[in-house]
Amino acid sequence: MELLDGKKILGEIKLELSQKVQNYIQKGRRAPCLVAVLVGDDGASQTYVASKERNSIECGFTSRALRFDASMTEDALLLEIEKLNADPEVDGFIVQSPLPKHISAQRVFDAINPEKDVDGFNTINSGRLMKGMNSFVPATPLGIVELLKRYNIDTQGKHCVVIGRSDIVGRPMSILMSLPSQFGNATVTLCHSKTKDLKQFTLQADIIIAALGKPEFLTGDMVKDGAVVVDVGITRIDDNTKKSGFRLSGDVKFDEVAPKCSFITPVPGGVGLMTIASLLQNTMKAYEAKNNL
Ligand code: GUN
């Protein structure tokens, strides 16, 4: 069993990006700029946004977070998005989800200029992905493909079972893995809460991507020997022995599943960090496209 080390790959990608940034700056250009918009005070979102900001800056990007109160109206948020769309200094921006209930997340994502939509949540980018066109791909599924790529994991003709059909992970993941490309071409089964006898599918899988958000859901008896297992879960579980008051739990029962795997991602230190890596790569892609580089 080998760990798919998100921390190591994030480090490699940050190094590649910072070298590009230095090169562009030496040529007299400004640095790429990523902005994160955060509405409300969800604890996990605050942590993610702070991490996105820190990692961007470590690559030499400029980055800032715009923080707004949970009572902000949808119209006020749409106005902020218009400003970011119009700002020539901003290459890409994201609106962190979840948003407060009174705001339509899809209306907000669709207000983002598709050229700056580095989270790939805009309907135009989703449509382009579906058609196999050049697009911004949501950072978590993109990060998973990058991780498989960097460990030379062959996906051609393999049976990939994705568990979970969210807009952010499961559904785009199933499309990416099925695309006719070097790191796609898999036979994909998309399982979800209404799937009957899930285990019959997971037991056939060469690659399992668990993205349902249920701690330790995938157990050893559900996985065949030699499978590649990617754990997207990051649920916070109360834990008084931790300084933060919680620990992170994946969707995979690691101790049972890991011994059966050829490769597996740890939680933390796996997919979560690859999400950041892909967001940074998408920001560089937006910057390069804008400047015809
Ligand atoms: N909420 C959970 N994951 C994500 C993400 O990748 N981007 C945004 N904007 N919100 C999220």
Image (cartoon, rainbow, N blue to C red):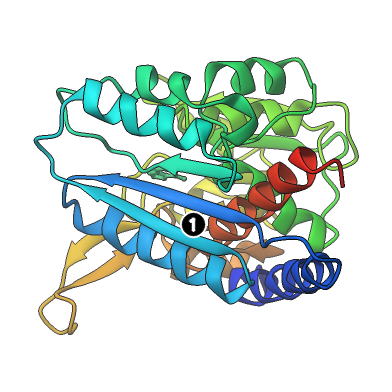
Tag count: 1
For image coordinates 88% across by 33% down, the residue present is 181
Q: Secondary structure at mark 1?
A: helix
For image coordinates 33% across by 24% down, the residue present is 78
On screen, residue 97 versus residue 82, left or right, reads: left
Quarter of the displayed picture in which ligand 1 can be seen: top left
* Quarter assignment of residue 206: top right
Task: For residue 232, say whether it is visible.
Answer: no
On screen, residue 276 versus residue 17, left or right, reads: left
On screen, residue 52 versus residue 150, left or right, reads: left
* Quarter assignment of residue 126: top right
Q: Position of residue 146 (x, y in %)?
A: 73, 53
**Is 134 placed above or below 4 here?**
above
Task: For residue 131, say whether it is visible.
Answer: yes
Q: Position of residue 28 (x, y in %)?
A: 80, 65
Between 243 and 260, the residue placed more toward the observer is: 243
**Is 15 placed above or below 98 here?**
below
**Is 146 placed above or below 53 here?**
above
Between 27 and 249, the residue placed more toward the observer is: 27
Q: Position of residue 52 (x, y in %)?
A: 47, 61
* Quarter assignment of residue 157: top right
For image coordinates 54% across by 17% down, the residue present is 123
For image coordinates 42% across by 67% down, the residue present is 51
Q: Amino acid at mark 1?
A: Gly
Between 195 and 197, the residue placed more toward the observer is: 195
Residue where numbered disc 1 is placed: 220
